[in-house]
Amino acid sequence: MRIANVTGRLTLRRDCGDTDVERASGGRFAADPQAVFERWDEFRAWADAEPADAEATPAVTDLDALGPPSPRPRQVFAIGLNYRAHAAESGHAVPQEPPTFTKYPSSLTGPSGDIALPDGRVDWEVELVVVIGRRAHRVAAEDGWSYVAGLTVGQDISERVRQLAGPVPQFSLAKSFPGFGPTGPELVTPDEFAHPDDLTLGCSVNDEVVQVGSTADLIFPVPELIARLSAVVTLYPGDVVFTGTPAGVGLGRTPQRFLNDGDELKTYIEGIGVMRHRFVTSTSD
């Protein structure tokens, strides 16, 4: 199953077109995309029973009309150094525990549009993003996938000067400027993938490929991350988890490379879709 946030409305996406969930369900489910995660199992049962062509309209293809699949999560988690090659390019050993920080929810945005460049050095990080579908606390790794509502494409955009400034790093602030957490274009349930633990992901800057990897190389795969996080905190429906980035970030290059005014960033994950963003020194009205 695929859903999307189309102009702020929860939309079921099928081969025959888009179905507005509130209208098709007669108001049983709200138009607000965030609300569905609290009733995820009930929604899945309804969607599976709904005729494929029920009230379908032509699919929206304009990325500008799409918002983040989980636009207002209670919690946003992010994992650092979760690919061995990225740990190496960052000058760190392979972690024994997943380095965890937060991106503040105000940084979330959709799969397209302009992102304002703050002062400093702004970097890209393609990531598989998980949205939680059930309350999770002390979950066993072998049960981890059953707590996942779906997967989407993400970028953990980072301003490196603030991130690495002493006396201690400022990961959360440096990665939470407006627009620094784009996700989309759709949320895809794990059962849509033949191998959900092995998805190709990557990104390009001005059509030059800068990152390519596979989620098969995650040090802590999705089920293990859910187990490790839920051992400490409670994960709530709609919570968002950025799972880490493969090698190829600008900070790890020689010479280092960062995003500039007018640069276009294209981000993809196989089986989910593509995001496109342009970086500007200031946003226009």
Image (cartoon, rainbow, N blue to C red):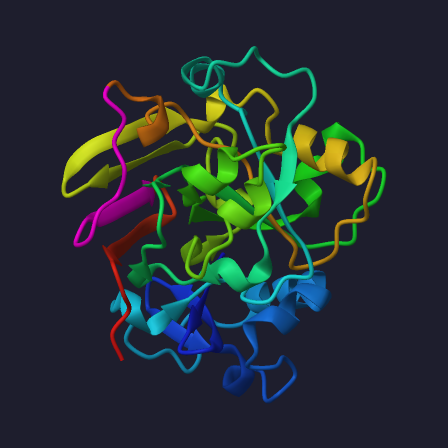
> Does the magenta portion include 49?
no
Seen from the viewer's position, the closer of residues 246 and 282 is 282
Taking the spot 38% from the left edge, 48% from the top edge, the residue there is 272
Q: Is any atom of residue 13 visible in this view?
A: yes
Seen from the viewer's position, the closer of residues 174 and 119 is 119
Q: Is residue 236 left or right of residue 188?
A: right
Residue 42 appears at what percent x and percent y? Answer: 70, 67
Residue found at the very far front of the displayed protein: 167
Residue 18 appears at what percent x and percent y? Answer: 37, 73
Whether 112 is drawn above or below 152: the answer is below
Range covered by the magenta-colored residues:
255-268
Taking the spot 30% from the left edge, 29% from the top edge, the residue there is 211
- SS assignment for the magenta stretch, majority: loop
Residue 107 appears at what percent x and percent y? Answer: 50, 59
Taking the spot 78% from the left edge, 53% from the top edge, the residue there is 135
Q: Is any atom of residue 127 visible in this view?
A: no
- Residue 61 figure quarter: bottom left
Whether 33 is drawn above or below 100: the answer is below
All told, the count of numbered labels is 0
Whether 89 is drawn above or below 168: the answer is above
> Does the magenta portion include 265?
yes
Taking the spot 46% from the left edge, 28% from the top edge, the residue there is 215
Q: Is residue 144 left or right of residue 285?
A: right
Whether 259 is drawn above or below 10: the answer is above
Q: Is residue 82 left or right of residue 252?
A: right
Residue 230 appears at what percent x and percent y? Answer: 79, 40
Give the position of the C terminus as an image quadrant: bottom left
